[in-house]
Image: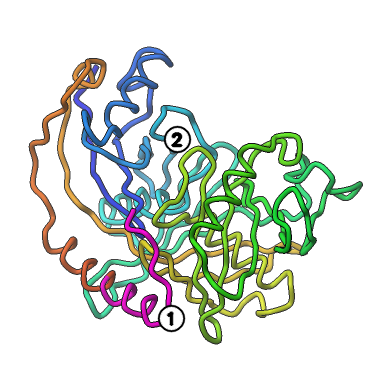
Amino acid sequence: MPALSLIKAHGSRNDIFVVDGAPHDHFATADELTRGVGLLCDRRRGLGGDGVYFVADHGDGTARAWFFNPDGSEALLCGNGMRCAGRVLLDRHQAESVVVHQGPYSFTVRDQGRTPHGVRQVSVELPAVDFAPAEPIVAEAGANGAYVDRLLPAFHASRHVTAVAVPNSHLITLIDSYDEAELIETGRRVAGSPDVFPIGANLSFVLPLAQDEVFVHTYERGAGLTPSCGSGVAASRAVLSRLGLVEPERPVTVRNPGGVARSLLQPVGDLWQPVLEGNATLVYATELDPAVLLGDGPVEFSGEVNMAEIGAFSELSRENLKVLSEAGIKPTEI
């Protein structure tokens, strides 16, 4: 098998490995792939990350991608990870936009310049949101499959919830004050209630901060609290418009513990297509022998760290956390 060339990057502190080539280019079997991804993402024995995007570059501004969670399971989408994969392709081809195909979906990633801090920004056009998915997120959604702004005692005694697929399944709740323990408890309740939430779901609490600005924190199924969830940002933004609080095409600033993003909804026929814009920061590049990832570790890093991009994002992050602190929000360091 050829050497595994990878770039570590992050979108709002979701750190993702972008690997050049398809999964089968580096691993002969599904078991080897699971083991390799698991060790690479392991924060004690491997290099440590929140997932791996394999990207087969077609050389014409398009690519095919596959995303794997840290446990080696495949996922339909990682919104923040797609920002990272897209950034790598944009740089490689010196392009203003690229198209990345994953599963049945196509994602257009566009260059959005840099912030005043020097942080590189990209935008990703995600699949249209679905408030009535074929597989209901809430078991008692009813004949049309929708579950919007309703009280569900099995979810929470007093919080209303809206279900939406982007295409990952999400539960979104608007709050008037942030309680991290409450978010964790509710997220665990969702995870422990497959009779109520048959396909599982990520849970986001959404706290309005100012006009066109909100705080979103997500409890992800199988992962717990995360610094940021790209599809959670898109789902939260869609619910704001579904509830009539913000016009769809109006950009909303979304602050997570991990960073700052913007999101709006583009009309596509009768549907809304979310656009997610935020940082795509390159941390380092290296090469590994795939056979190393089939061992027990530790995996040793050898490569050049991108201190300029890391430093620029640190400035942006400090500014974001200051805004959250002044709003009385002090999330646990993740």
Residue on which the image places disc 1 = 327
Above or below: residue 188 compared with residue 227: above
Kind of residue at badge 2: Trp
Q: Secondary structure at mark 1?
A: loop
At 11% across and 30% down in the image, what residue appears?
Answer: 300
User: Upstream in the sequence, badge 2 or badge 1?
Assistant: 2
**Crowding at label 2, few (<14), some or many (≥20) Cα neighbours within 10 Å?**
many
At 70% across and 34% down in the image, what residue appears?
Answer: 194
**Crowding at label 1, few (<14), some or many (≥20) Cα neighbours within 10 Å?**
few
Residue on which the image places disc 2 = 66
Task: Give the mark toward the camera: 2 or 1.
Answer: 1
* Residue 116 point in image, percent of width and height: 25, 80
Query: Magenta stretch containing residue 325, yes or no?
Result: yes
Magenta stretch?
318-334
Kind of residue at badge 1: Ala
* Residue 13 point in image, percent of width and height: 32, 56
* Distance from the alpha carbon under mark 2 to that under mark 1: 38 Å
Asked whether, in this view, residue 195 is left or right of residue 237, the answer is: right
